Image (cartoon, coloured by chain):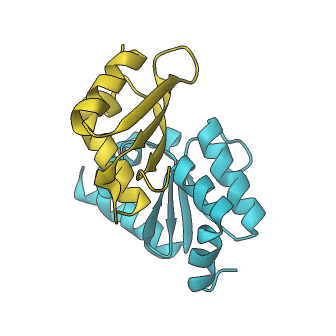
Chain colours: A cyan, B yellow
Amino acid sequence: MSDDTQARIKQLIDDNKVMLFMKGTKSFPQCGFSNAVVQVLKREGVAFETFNILADPAVREGIKVFSNWPTLPQLYVNGKFIGGCDITVEMHESGELRKELAAAGLV
Amino acid sequence: MLDVSAVEAMLKAAFPDGTITVRDLTGTSDHFEASVVSARFEGISRVERHRMVYASLGNAMSGPIHALALKTLTPSEA
């Protein structure tokens, strides 16, 4: 991954307390797993930023190296990698995601 | 193209003590759901458990497998 891509990814994560790298956008998710995470974040009532990796192949591959995680979507809260769809949904159902968001003063 | 038994075999190799079930979610051999119950997960975070599973699948995750929904539990959690 080029340094430029790495820097761009880091910037996105640093600038946005809740950052979701996904396929598609908030209003037009283009993958069931990405959409599931969008719905979870809406139900948590937290503001979040998204990045459509389908529109940027460099970030699409770079984010997998950045997090050592082979799939999309990828959720970051307060700079920390939370997980993909199954972990985010599991944490939402157990209340752990709420705790992470509250600890970062986001809900 | 990978089928359920191929994915199961790779997971079994990495988690010999594990109870492993794999399901093809879409019938297209690229969206799977896998449950791995293993003592190797004791005291390990969810994210790290999933990373262990992804590592055991080698480069299958960067091509043939598009999505893998995971359940990673210790015997006591199962």
Residue furthest front as drawn: B76
Q: Residue at horizontal 50%, vertical 49%?
A: B78
Q: Residue at horizontal 65%, vertical 80%?
A: A106
| Nearer to the camera, A64 or A11 | A64
Query: Could you tell me if residue A41 is visible in this image?
Result: yes
User: How many numbered discs sit on the rendered protein?
Assistant: 0
In the image: residue A28, left or right of residue A33: right
Q: Quadrant of residue A6?
A: bottom left
Q: Position of residue B44 (x, y in %)?
A: 34, 63
Q: Position of residue A88 (x, y in %)?
A: 57, 56
Query: Could you tell me if residue A68 is visible in this image?
Result: no
Q: Is residue A82 above or below residue A24?
A: below
In the image: residue B55, left or right of residue B27: left
| Nearer to the camera, A59 or B18 | B18
| Nearer to the camera, A14 or A103 | A103
Q: Position of residue B42 (x, y in %)?
A: 34, 60
Q: Position of residue A91 (x, y in %)?
A: 59, 62
Q: Residue at horizontal 73%, vertical 53%?
A: A39
Q: Is residue A28 above or below residue A16?
A: above
Which quadrant: the C terminus of chain A?
bottom right
Q: Residue at horizontal 36%, vertical 43%?
A: A70
